[in-house]
Image: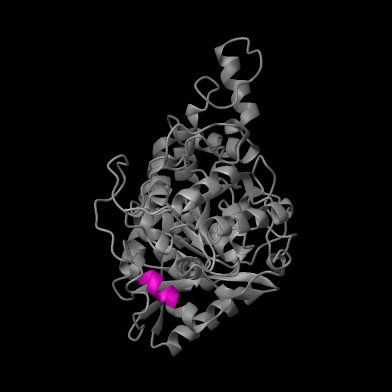
Amino acid sequence: MYEKTLTQLAAALKSGEFSSRELTAHYLQRIEQADGKLNSFISVTAEQALKQAEVAERPSGRQRRAAVRHSPSAQRYFLHPGRETSCGSKMLDNFIAPYNATVVEKLNAAGTISLGKTNMDEFAMGSSNENSYYGPVKNPWDLTAVPGGSSGGSAAAVAAGLVPAAMGTDTGGSIRQPAAFCGITGLKPTYGRVSRFGIIAYASSLDQAGPMARSAEDCAHLLGVIAGHDGRDSTSVARGVPDYVEGLNAPLSGLKIGLPKEYFGDGLDPDVEKAVREAVKVYESLGATVREVSLPHTHYAIPAYYVIAPAEASSNLSRYDGVRFGHRCDNPSDLIDLYTRSRAEGFGEEVKRRILIGTHTLSEGFFDAYYTKAQQVRRLIRQDFLDAFEDVDVLMGPASPTPAFDLGAKKDPVSMYLQDIYTIAVNLAGIPGISVPAGLAGGRPVGLQILGTHFAEAQLLNVAHQFQQATDWHLQRPAFAEEYA
């Protein structure tokens, strides 16, 4: 069962090849057998999942999405009542969510079955999934390599066949980069396309939830479920949700592709570049035309992001004070001691680093020099994309400058931050992006990143799907997945 895509599983369920309970039990067994080596799950809710499967099989008058009904999935730091939601942090270890995130509500209503919470970099801060309080996740393609971050647990679980699909969040590439490292498909929607209500915030103007699965077709089905306006989220856009599946098979003849020259310069691994350019040739064979474009402010994206995101994190994480919820230190001498030691004990090193950066940039005397200037740069980066989309339909390039690197290989924060050089600008601009498997470099997957203008998810999914119809990279599995067949 595990080798099937979400769409194929739906067809098998409909034909009666197996039941929802049998499918759920199959994946739970794979998790039990294999996840000890991967560490992709923080918690597994087997009993609840089996009960959900039984309920999903009962006749219902509600119309549900055929491709997600009865289908198992996993989630990260979406609030889910009665279940632990820790964000990979000691600060929220054993925190039980009091209500559902909108994404969870919509998935439940569609009939999906949640198997548990996947591992992640603490509060989504990281590019390797080595910053989790629960230990690092390993890449199923090579257990000595990272799976990417911060949605590394979700990516590794999908790649290893422990779940057919998972939800992730993307603040600076946290869906697309781990999808690239693990050889799966990951979609970051337009900011505001999917409700953020019930998603524990890292950087509120950048965070966006999205699906991770084996194929663009699977992602199209999932996006159709989770997208839409939500009155409980002030950043949610009141815009109709198209049928993302309907246009998947539209021909690509006449498609205009732009290759940003800034994405093919120094620092790009030659094998990654080769795989990406080979993928672009596939598009040319499908009738697309290719031209070079420029995004001149790309080199400002990382410094701008690492001012804006930590500033917002400093504000969002100030609520964790040891009083209302979260980790509380033992025997505090006074209120200041309670705050200080609870945060010192509850937060990991990377989270502390970003909080301190953010607090500094928001302080008097530095706000205009850093935060305001970074927001001005953000506007220029957004305009670069808008100008490029005047001449081309989509942009293409690598999702990451290298394939997955070894665990422990990045010793300093700056080298880790540079891993997001091709993804961060997308979040600053609020546009959608998708990473699809496009080859191997040294036996590790390479991701092709495809970008579109605001609310162009249907086109991105069509472009990605047509590539996957012409290639089989998305169907390839790591040897690890076969060990537990």
464 inside magenta stretch = yes
Nearest to the observer: residue 88 or residue 483: 483
What color scheme is it?
one colour
For the question of whether residue 174 can be seen, the reply is no
Q: In the displayed structure, does residue 392 sit left or right of residue 150? A: left
**Is 201 colored magenta in this rendering?**
no
Question: In the rendered view of the protein, which quadrant contains the C terminus?
Answer: bottom right
Q: Is residue 67 positioned above or below 42 on the image? A: below
Q: Which residue is at 48% across, 38% downward? A: 313
* Magenta span: chief secondary structure: helix
Q: Look at the picture and state if 171 lies above or below 253.
A: above
Tell me the quarter of the image containing the N terminus.
Answer: bottom right
Q: x and y percent of residue 233 in the render?
A: 32, 41
- Residue at horizontal 40 percent and vertical 65 percent from the top: 220
Q: Which residues are magenta?
A: 459-465
Residue 449: x percent and y percent?
48, 69
Residue in view at x 60 percent, y 15 percent: 337
